[in-house]
Amino acid sequence: MRSKLIIGVFAIVFSLTMLRSGWYLENGYRLIGVNASDGIWNLALISELMNSFPPEHPGFAGELLKGYHFFYHILLAGIAKVTSIPVPNLYFHIFPLIISYLWGYGVYRIVVKLYKNKKAGLWSAFFSLFGGSFAFLLPLIWKQDLSINSGFGICQPLGCSLVNPAFASSIVLMIWSYYFLIEYLQTNKRKWAIWLIVATGISVGFKVYAGMILMGALAVAAVFRACSQRKFDLLIIFGLALLMAMAVFFPFNANYGFLLFQPLWPPHITMQGPLGFTRWRVLWELAEYNHNLWGIIKLEIWANGVFFLGNMGTRLLVIFALGKFIKRGVLKIDAVFYLTMLGISYLIPMFFLQPAGGVFNMVQMYWYFLFLVSILVGPGIVSLMSRINSETYKLAIYLAIIVLTLPSTATDLQILLTDKGRIIDNNQLEVLEFLRGYGDYDKTVLQLPELQQKYTKEELYGWFTSRSSTIIPALGGKRVYAVNEGVTFPDLDINKRLALIMRFLLPEKVCNKTNWDKLVCQDALDDAYNMLQSEDIRFIYSKEDRLWLDNWDKINIVYKGEGGSIYGI
């Protein structure tokens, strides 16, 4: 009971990245950090799945959503429909706590199951949630302004996990898949096999990288068991899980292309980006120019060592668990499964890049590696302490571990708790509330950019990328014709939709008080109306008053307020 309570406290602290968002305040609706962008996108997708399956893109009405992991969103959408709990409450407040607890408790259960030590389980749970790198040392040594969270190129758990719900939920699946495998191997009970099949099979729908890691590890473990023990049960389990994964993946797969071979790019990017002040790239180019092969080798060792050791941080205490791990049996099936997950999560992103999304997407695979390493940190700490007799020394080491581990977590929490966030003001909330209750979800809204005399192609693209968002489908209950999706989907023709918006804005230039009845104005209005009809647009939303819309006889003003106007077609 005590362990569960401690893990519950861990879960509450870990959830603070989400818990402060999604509240109605006196001056509006508050969203903290990336929840003001990524959170809005996730709410929009959940809203879409509550109303339509297979889902369309909520910010590109009429386009089927492919190439995106949305099983977490399906889960929340289903619960919201059954329970009538508001989606923002589920997304910002309820599920972050559930995920955090299942994460910490799952790690605890695995470690206790394998190493029979509750203290080790708690330490592993702590490190898996709050582990940090050595990036906090960089400003002390070089006096550079660097991110304490990702100074060595990889974001640490607290700052990046729950705000990326696809990743966080896939970690839970990874933890419990490992646990189900351990239980099955120890008991040979069918129920654990079924749970293992389901957890690994659906993981690709939560996060493709998690599916790659789990399915790859299960395949290696199954083949190893078949070859070494002449037992083929895991091969059957893997085959069934693979069928489920294919059923989940292929119907919604998009053509992103194959992985690109780019050896050792993570340490290279780190040494040229956050650690560019070390002049590593200049030295590397100089060695290459002089055909100094040994110089290049030393620079590569330097870059890879800094990248690995810097990101590991106090997770390096895992070395003290190696003895226990080896003693348990490196060739045990669960050990093979674990080591394969470690290898896939570290080596694939070290040598390959994803064509779409590139660096940002592929580096997320390292988040899994840091998590997986954390599982053994608890046993490592317990093993270290077993060699020390003095209670004073033990206390000093415990304090040192915590002090050297928590700087990135403490920095993230300090920023988080002092961030006032973005406020969606009450005027805009009134517009969204009206829109949500007026007409069906599938009535597409054309959101117009800010009013100005002339829009060039570049200016309209700038509005699309930096100022438009999926806030209408997220909180207003309608799909939008074209707004920034927040995620890269290579199959979407953004330029085509922006060109149509540009054409629609033509009446703004020619329809004014002096030439309202002129032929050129009428032609522009007819052209705009034809565009609306061809794209099946039912509403227009404008934050600012537009004379030509107010006087247009083919549309009706259905709402007008401080937050903007809504026109019905």
Image (tube, rainbow, N blue to C red):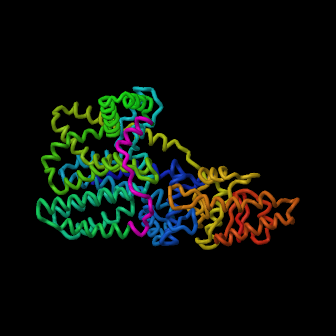
Specify whether 491 is left or right of 361. Answer: right
Query: Magenta residues?
Result: 249-272
Q: Is residue 402 among what the camera can see?
A: no
How many numbered marks does the figure carry? 0
The answer to which image quadrant residue 505 occupies is bottom right
Query: Which quadrant of the rendered structure holds the N terminus?
Result: bottom left
Q: Is residue 387 among what the camera can see?
A: yes
Q: Is residue 556 magenta?
A: no
Residue 177 percent location from the top left of the image:
28, 60
At 54% from the left edge and 55% from the top edge, which residue is drawn? 23
Residue 143 percent location from the top left of the image:
45, 26
At 64% from the left edge and 59% from the top edge, which residue is drawn? 498
Looking at this view, is 100 or 439 the one in front? Answer: 439
Residue 407 percent location from the top left of the image:
39, 36
Query: Which quadrant of the rendered structure holds the C terminus?
Result: bottom right
At 57% from the left edge and 69% from the top edge, which residue is drawn? 62
Q: Is residue 251 magenta?
A: yes
Residue 227 percent location from the top left of the image:
13, 61
Specify whether 358 is left or right of 126. Answer: right
Looking at this view, is 221 or 297 the one in front? Answer: 297
Question: In the picture shown, does residue 101 fall above or below 405?
Answer: below
Q: Residue furthest right?
A: 514
Specify whether 379 is left or right of 293. Answer: left
At 17% from the left edge and 59% from the top edge, which residue is drawn? 224
Question: In the picture shown, does residue 214 fall above or below 266?
Answer: below
